[in-house]
Image: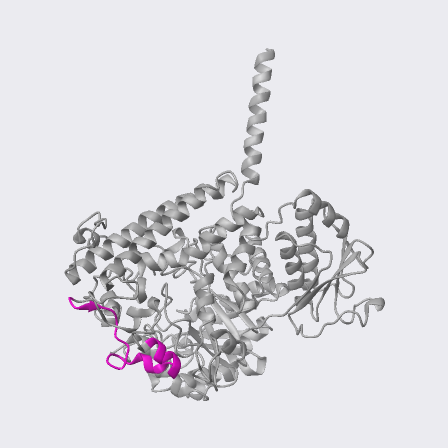
Amino acid sequence: MANRTLRSLVFLLVMAWGLSARVFAEDGYDLWLRYKPLEDAARAELHKAAQQVAAPGERTPTLQAALDELVRGIDGLAGQAPTIAESAESGAILLVKPDTLPEHLKGKVSFDGLGGDGYRLLSVDGERTLIAANSDIGLLYGSFALLRHLQTGGRLEGLDVSEAPRLQRRMLNHWDNPDRTVERGYAGQSIWDWWKLPDHLDARYTDYARANASIGINGTVLNNVNAKAEMLTARWIAKAAALANVLRPYGIRVYLSARFSAPFELGATETADPLDPAVRNWWAKKADEIYAAIPDFGGFLVKANSEGQPGPQDYGRSHTDGANMLAAAVRPHGGIVLWRAFVYSETDASDRAKQAYAEFKPLDGRFADNVTVQVKNGPIDFQPREPIHPLFGAMPETSVTAEFQITKEYLGFVTHLAYLGPLYEEVLKTDTFRGGAGQTAAKLLMAEPLSGLAGVANIGSDRNWSGSHFDQANWYAFGRLAWDPEASAEDIAREWVAMTFSRDREVIAKVTGMMMASREAVVDYMTPMGLAHLMGTGHHYGPAPWVDDLARPEWNPAYYHRADAGGIGFDRTATGSDAIAQYAAPLAGLYGDRQTVPPEFLLWFHHVGWDETLPSGRTVWAELVHHYDRGVAAVGTMRRTWAGLEGRIDPARFRDVSDFLAIQEKEAIWWRDACLAYFASVSGRALPPGTRPPAHPLSWYQAQQFPYAPGHP
């Protein structure tokens, strides 16, 4: 009987331990806001210095969110929650604005340069820490900044930090559809449960708002740029308004993608012609209706006359006619229009890369002052690497917003580790030479009247938000670079690792090293040396450089690499499409000269013979093989580095990442083998001596089909 009782007790203890382990297992939901306990000395120090949090003045929802976050964060970091007080005593964190600053500190604390969103973190009196700002949202941003400082090893003693965002609008663009599918989304269904809105508000919406506010994002477009007209009906406006109410305390304004033909499709007008008075009146009244429900509505994002979407050109009108009509509708309410420059249609048979510049450059100065033209980072379509878009700096009389892609449509979806911070940084640091040397994309964006950065979101209903743990870093990096476009992608990666995985210095160094090498690895095994768009058509999954039989030339991967028996690459110099002429003269000269073009853009701008010798000493063919092999090897190195961290990363996330890295290595080999098999067949060249041949004949790779690849409409 005693033995049976003992066995039962042991069984219950084991079950309880297992349940506890499952309950507290890391699953990625907390993102970079984990607030795990600090080391003993730091934890004791924080507990002593942060026994109270206080915010004199009116307790607005935003100020309450800041206080709640400080309590949550300090509770996790110090092991004990501070109390919320009306006034600050010793051992306190005090949130103040100019009109609530304690009398004895007036004249000692400067709010200069903080603007509406900035903050200052300051140690005072040896016993208190100030979070100072001109607004409640600045106090919220400052609260998150203080917690980030503590999570990454910072101390309160001697603290004096001032920051303000360098771009006005820092926005996510959701490509989410009313049926909860997500175009180019790889993290499950849409986060927005439209069917249950507006009556049920998932707690996840608040956590979404917290995460975005923690990195300074202040706008979100709720729906796909391939918009449905129904999104502008009363039923759907009510759903958007419910979400706006959740996001508002966190400083996030809601925007909607608008279908240009909505008044016609909804049966209200006989046309969608932007110069038709009835159409203009419909949009004005629609704006009034939206702002009545969402007083701080941000405005409209529009994709027009691209990929079959309706637009003003359907009626013989210009982009300015369409954009300015919508701008007039939202102007009385302080709204803006973001008009996308992604125009992908049969307008330039010679080179798809030229289309946006050709259509928009002549319109400079004709857009209303509450319109910003939203330009992708490169002239094609979010490829693993592209040169900068020639429109940056080319429209000095028009506000331009940059558009990046956070979701990895062309970079292996969620199973490939590809930290995009270096991609964003590469673009932002590129000197456009518009108006002279030193005019980087970052500087140009910061000088715009309606300055902003937009990112196509990678967020979904998956428990870890982004489908993979490392893809969270791309969301994080986007927000941090939208706050400061001149920040370091490596510094951002390091801080993300410290908050997401471990504060151990060796772990941070190794994981940061993996991240910083990852995007280049993907470029190498997918599209090296300036190649682009070699992906499977439609779904963009896996290699398909051989596709050349689709209806329109620019739908075919073969259109982009131009490989033939003589060489490879797209001639965009004066002897080819002359796309080079769209850049400022110094940049055009750099790209157009075979001796100065950066090697990573060689085949983007030049058609080069297979046997030509490059500065590396290798022929073009041997260099191509070298890049594909280097990419595969880099993934193997990442796998080994990660494997060496076993026991230093929580088991659940360690296993998840290990599985995905194994998939990535398998698919990197697939990419390498398929592309080399194809290019060998086109060039007639044998693989260099000692090179491993593809595992299968070319026909095997060509026969692969993926009709149910995720994220494909």
Instruction: In the rendered view, tell whether residue 72 sits above or below residue 554.
Output: above
In which quarter of the view is residue 688 placed? bottom left
Residue 210 rendering spot, x and y as whole percentages: 60, 58
In-image side of 713 versus 432 (left or right): left
Residue 27 rendering spot, x and y as whole percentages: 51, 45
Residue 328, visible in the rendered structure: yes
Residue 569, magenta (yes or no): yes
Residue 498, magenta (yes or no): no
In-image side of 122 versus 284 (left or right): right
Residue positioned most to the top = 1
Q: Of residues 561 and 240, which is closer to you in this image?
A: 561
Number of residue marks: 0
Q: Of residues 524 and 236, which is closer to you in this image?
A: 524
Query: Where's the N terminus, which quadrant?
Result: top right
Residue 297 rendering spot, x and y as whole percentages: 56, 72
Instruction: In the rendered view, tell whether residue 675 sits above or below residue 333.
Output: above
Query: Where's the C terminus, which quadrant?
Result: bottom left
Find the magenta span and give its range.
565-591
Residue positioned most to the right = 104
Residue 706, visible in the rendered structure: no
In-image side of 78 versus 182 (left or right): right
Q: What sort of colour scheme is used for the picture?
A: one colour
Q: Residue at x 55, y 23 (%)?
A: 11
In-image side of 203 versus 510 (left or right): right
Residue 316 rendering spot, x and y as whole percentages: 34, 87
Q: Residue at x 45, y 62 (%)?
A: 422
Q: Of residues 458 and 430, which is closer to you in this image?
A: 430
